[in-house]
Image (cartoon, rainbow, N blue to C red):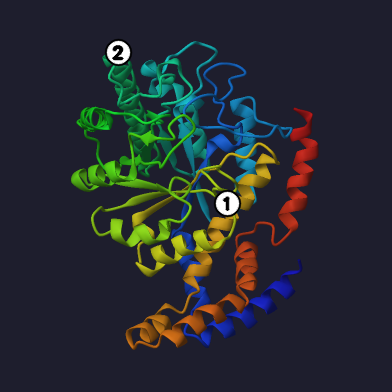
Amino acid sequence: MKKEIIKKAYQIAKDQYASFGVDTEKALSEMNNLVISLHCWQTDDVGGFEREGAELGGGGIQATGNFPGKARTIAQMRDDLDKVMSLLPGKQRLNLHAIYGEFGGEKIDRDQIELKHFQGWIDWAKKRNIGLDFNCTCFSHPYADDGFTLSSKNSKIRKFWIEHTKRCRAIAAEMGKQLGTPSVHNIWIPDGSKDTPVDRYTHRKILKKSLDEIFSVKYPKKYLKDSVESKLFGIGSESMVVGSHDFYIGYAVSNNTMITLDNGHFHPTEQVGDKISSILLYVDELLLHLTRGVRWDSDHVVTFNDELTLIAQEIVRAKALNRVNVGLDFFDASLNRIEAYVTGTRAAQLAFLYALLEPYEMLLKYEEQGKNFERLSLMELMKTKPFGAVWDYYCMMSDVPVGEEYIEEIGKYEKEVLFKR
């Protein structure tokens, strides 16, 4: 797309938004405060590198599809991630799971992982001037087969996962220290019951005790941020999930720990965006895992839809961009994985830019004056404004492909790299 056309279209959009009191230049500047944490597991369908040819299994997680070009080595994964980031405007960082260490072909069980297994990732991130986030991996392991990890009544199993999570927090803190930006460590466990249990209380009491032990080791917040993630149900935990939203919201508020809102982890009729303003009143920060559930937590590629828009709007309206850590969480193996990243990340960025271009002051004035018709009408009118022209200009100024140009670029990478694997 020619730069002259993009600039002309942007100027028209700028003038239109200005008539509603919206400064597009300010909105574009604020986009620099949005950093999106890319989830490494889209590159290889959550297989990890604990062993050659590892495949995902257990813990209510499933990647469907078999599109060619899956990353089968860390080198391939890094190449793919570099390609993804070259096609994205704005700022990114990388979110790693513990199964993505460099283990050199050795069998390293999860209660034995060390910093040395992730130093290569730290060095990689340092060269790219990006931060790293981290996750303990409490699934796809024999000690997760019975459906319980940190909440297990079996002390041997429970201690194994406590040690694993402690080590993950220590590694994450060192990532934050070396890279000069705090690493977010997120705890999600698959613990739950397929059929109706009779003893929910004990499992939740055990989980609380395990978390207390894990968090008893303190790290400076400039190095490490802790978060806990709830879920409504999973495969094999349809009747009860130990780490429910009610459990974790109580734990997060009691301990001023971040809570992770994965918008695929709630009932389809719940609005995750509505939860944000409430939670921010009681904790300093929160973590988002943006995804797209189709009928259930199916982790489809994020698209620019109403749910995503409300989440972004609620954050912007609360002036809380600096209190919300934005991450992605989807893994679709049925299509080009690079395209999945770029489409999903751009969708998230689109939602935040759209929110930043909202005439908030005018809408708030209508609301406080009881002018609900005017408020509704203006919100509808804004949907027709030339938002796409502002987005194209943002991409051009970021020196990344504009419009459909990235599709052709990914197609070229697919033929030259992915299909040759």
* Residue beneath disc 2: 156
Question: Left or right: 134 with respect to 406?
Answer: left
The mark that comes first in sequence, 1 or 2, is 2
Question: Left or right: 163 with respect to 407?
Answer: left
**Mark 1 and mark 2 residues within 8 Å of each other at the beta carbon:** no
Vertical relation: 97 (above or below) 253: above
Vertical relation: 187 (above or below) 155: below
Q: Which mark is residue 100?
A: none
- Indicate the secondary structure of the residue bearing disc 2: helix
- Indicate the secondary structure of the residue bearing disc 1: loop
Q: Which amino acid type is marked by label 1?
A: Val
* Residue beneath disc 1: 302
The residue positioned 28% from the left and 47% from the top of the image is 249
The residue positioned 40% from the left and 17% from the top of the image is 143
Distance from Cα at disc 1 to Cα at disc 2: 39 Å
- Residue 134 position, x and y percent, is 42, 35
- Residue 191 position, x and y percent, is 37, 29
Q: In this rendering, does residue 89 appear at all?
A: no
